Image (tube, helix red, strand yellow):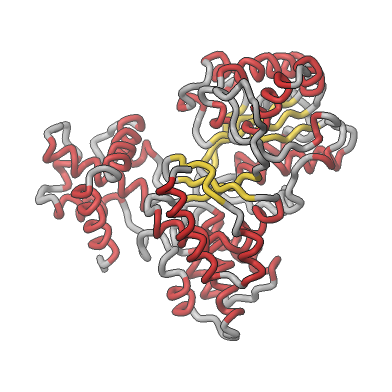
Amino acid sequence: MNQQMSDQWKNILKDIKKELVPTSYLAVRESKIHAIQSDTMVISVVSEFVRNKIMDAFLPVFLGAIQKQFPEIQNLDFVVEEPVEKNSTLDTEYVPTHERSSYFNNPESVDSLPLNPRYTFENFIVGSNNQLAYAGCKSITSDLGKVYNPLFLYGGVGLGKTHLLQAIAHECNESGNKNIVYITSEQFLNQVVHSIQVNTVDKFRENIRRVDYLIIDDIQFLVGKERTQEELFHTFNALYDQKKQIAISSDRPQNELKGIQERLISRFSMGLTVDIYPPDYETRLAILRNKDKAEQYDLPDEVLDFIASQQFNNIRQLEGSLIRVASYSSMQNIQNVTVDFAKETLKNFLPLSYKKFTPEEIKVIVADFYNTKPQILESKRRSKDVAVPRQVAIYLIREMTNYSLPVIGRYFGGRDHSTIIHSYEKIKSEMKVDPKLKNEVEEIIKKLQYTS
């Protein structure tokens, strides 16, 4: 972390300190920036307890404070970090060491896995956005390596991938005598590096290749890690040949994992691939009601409805908003929580707009802003005066709606999903270096927010 970032983090901690009671702040004050990846900040914390506490109760506080210093950050992720081992000769592939559990020394015992006890199938809210993923994960717990092998699960941050993978481990544990390893790709990398350092590679391979279930979370972090990919490739083959089950999660589909070996991509695609996308209103409301009941917040239905009506990008943001409203009402001793109170409490944390927009409505506003016509944005013209408004409209539709890439493409003359994602990424990246474009997009957002 450079000096500028260090100073920014100090300011973030000052803001967080203002929001938390002293005992809570003491628990989180040792946290620091681990990495920034696109619009996601990864924060290192000193223990699993602190990570869970932040995610359960303080997520909105952290995000609000961070966005003052880093406006581009939309999502937070957390890692538990121990001091980095010195004298490493493998720096090119080594990352700061995270929690090293004993499950490779004793893979037969699922109790040694870092599982969240709440991440079970029973606690997972099934909706249209995740029902196929839920069914796929559920099915592989009964037929070891026979039905869908591997199971490849992908989707954005905070949509329930980790919950489902850990639910697989819980379910298998309850069914008895299954050797299970649940691990993040980063932990897998560290295990490979550590085994090389201490000359126990053969023991590592023996342990990892005699499990019944290998569950790897966030496989995208292995991008560019050639030695670890090599080890995973041979581990995959060994387990697959023995008809052992493999389950993998990623934040993107296989064909977008640039920097992962083609032969691994091919194997990831051999079984069932399922995606999770942001929940619809009904699913968001069900999630909030479930959380409200579990935590005994007893918030009024109209407040839950208000929060559910916001188009949050992920479930962490959704639940974080519920926790913020409940916490603030408790601290202020407010007995009758209203929608107005929820709006005021969440004013800096709500998505871009209070209303739902269609792609057509966004196209009209963008076209008007750039003094052109919506139909022009659908044309094949590539001149800058048409391309920029078209790309801005695509960016905003992607940000402010839940429409899929192919559907968005149909609103722009039938363009394919690769063109849509290119337009989105182009505007997203250029806004970081082009103040004029950033101001234009913000002005359009204001127009959208105040459109009746």
Give percent across and percent down for residue 124.
67, 51
The residue that appears at 59% across and 35% down in the rendered structure is 218
- From the viewer's perspective, is residue 196 above or below residue 303? above
Q: Is residue 160 left or right of residue 71?
A: right
Q: Nearer the viewer, residue 400 or 344?
A: 344
Work out which residue is located at the far right of the displayed protein and give it. Answer: 177
User: Toward the viewer: 375 or 446?
Assistant: 446
Q: Residue furthest front?
A: 87
Looking at the image, residue 330 lies above or below residue 217: below
Give the percent coordinates (x, y) of residue 236. Answer: 68, 18
Determine the residue positioned at 90% across, 33% down. Answer: 177
Q: Looking at the picture, how far across and down is residue 178, in whole percent? A: 85, 32
Q: Name the residue: 65% across, 20% down.
A: 232
User: In the image, 166: left or right of 338?
Assistant: right
Position of residue 101 in the picture relative to residue 437 (left or right): right
**Number of marks drawn:** 0
Determine which quarter of the picture holds residue 173. Answer: top right
Quick one: quadrant of the C terminus? bottom left
Residue depicted at x 22% and y 58%: 443
Q: Give the x, y percent position of residue 348.
A: 41, 66
For residue 442, say whether it is visible.
yes
Where on the picture, by quarter, is residue 166? top right
- Dividing the picture into quadrants, the one containing residue 152 is top right
Can residue 281 be seen in the rendering of this structure? no
